[in-house]
Image (spheres, grey):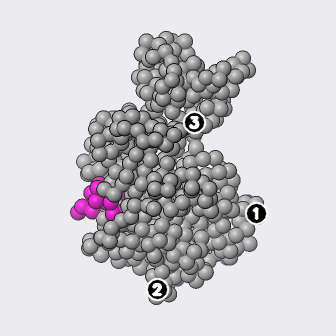
Amino acid sequence: MRTSYGPDYPRTLSALLAWSSRDPTAPIVSDAAGTLGRHAFYQRVLCTTAGLRRAGVGAGTRVALWLPNSAGYLAVIFACARLGALAVHINTRFRAAEVGNLLRRSRATALVTDWDFAPVDFPTILAGLPIEDRVHLRSALAVSAPGAIELAGLPVLPLDGPAPDAGPDAATAEAPCLTFTTSGTTSGPKLVLHDQQAIAGHAVDVARRIGLDAAGAALLGAVPFCGTFGNATAMAAIAGGAHIVCLAQFDGAVAAGLVRKHRITHMVGGDDMFGRIAAASNGRPFDSIRFSGFAAFHSTAASSIAAAEALGMRPRGLYGSSEVQALFSIAEGENRLLGGGVPVSGRARLAVRDPETGVALPAGSSGELWIDAPSRFVGYLENQAATEKAVAADGMFRTGDLGRLDGAGFVYEARLGDAMRLGGFLVSPEEIEAVIQGLPGIASVQVVAASRAGDPVPVAFVQPRDGAVVQEAALRTQCLERLARFKVPERIVIVDRFPIADSPNGPKVQRVKLREMAEALLREPSRISTGEMSARQH
């Protein structure tokens, strides 16, 4: 049984929308089309609800949302919840194979998309999908589709209708309201199912913890709303009555300009986002920022965050997942680059257990992090076996993360799949990466484990700084001076770039591919040169 929120929390997204007592005329969301106050946004939600209802959307209907960040996207989220429908979020960076996979597996019967988002031709991609991927779709609803009446055999319907036709509010606390996709290959990411009370309650906890309920609060909505990172912060801004400034496509200079124009007080994102905003700042501090939080996705996180700190962005480390939602916990001080921290909910339960036996470990010992919290997911959509494997009878969720308890919170160390058993010790790759990152001429580094004669050994992939000349032998010598022998990489491979995958929460290095490359290199070193390894990244 999942820990629940108390009676003093909103239990539906409709209740969340009415939660803040702020001035109803104050701005609540801005995008390229303009700014809406709270009352105007509520009317937008009613009109969108009416349009969805006219298209046959109701309780239990699955609606795919393939949209860039905008006021319209947020309105659709609340409209689906009001109807009791399930919103299936699709990343705008996904292409045919990924989109088709999600449509087929979710069995969405309606698709809401945008005809006018220049970076992505949604209609053309959809029309090119195999019929078996879109066999369940019955209609497409258009944010903007001048003159379009049909798409791939589907009727194209207007998204909005008259507000009085919205009908009664059918939202309920236990109604599944959205899915996020987990990280994974396009053939197998799981669909994480959340109900309305989890989304609404977590939004209130986050708003209170980071000050989105304070006067003048404004959030830069730069992270896609399709993922838990962007969604959780947007919902928290709604809960707090803050102003959300939407950024449909991230650009460092544009983001920096919006921060200054709208006096942004809150921003969250990957470490690379902070680095790109800092690079576009021209050295001018951002004096309006009250809170910023980041997730470290790259080995260059330390330098990006240092640059952000120098400009007054005050970044804290964030921890979360699709299953327990983003901003589950916030890390301050020296642990912020590792992540973890203290949960935003006082109702969260934490445990660290032996990943093989499940036996609880004492504070300070590294093991698998288990979590129960009211923000926890309901299960994986139509995958009961995976749900039962991930959630224990006592309601605790196996995160698959390596961590240790620390005071009132915890420290995140690595993904268990990334952690390496070296010399009899469990070692986080970040420990080795930090040493190599500090060597002259290194821009970025990733360390993975590979098998040599049946034993795991570390292999490092490094990107040199522009113009720098680095050599494997010299790097290994320096590692031998700074690391225990069993932690020194067996090979240090020089590459132009790392394989990158776009996730709903930002770009991430594909460590699975790096492990495959490392295995191939150790298995057949004579056949795979570092030049070939580098070429595989492009």
Q: Is residue 206 magenta?
A: yes
Q: Which numbered disc, 1 or 2, marks the residue that appears first in the sequence?
A: 1
Query: Within the image, what quadrant is residue 172 found in?
Result: bottom left
Q: Which numbered disc, 1 or 3, marks the residue that appears first in the sequence?
A: 1
Label ID, residue 132: 1
- Neighbour tally class for label 1: few under 14, some 14-19, many 20 plus, Cα within 10 Å: few
Q: How much space separates mark 1 and mark 2, taking CA atoms?
A: 35 Å
Q: Dot 3 lies on which element?
A: helix
Query: Within the image, what quadrant is residue 150 found in?
Result: bottom right
Q: Which residues are magenta?
A: 203-219
Q: How much space separates mark 2 and mark 3, taking CA atoms?
A: 48 Å
Q: Amino acid at mark 2?
A: Pro
- Residue 492 visible: no
> What quarter of the picture does the C terminus occupy?
top right
Residue that carries the numbered disc 2 in the rendered image: 168
Q: Amino acid at mark 1?
A: Glu
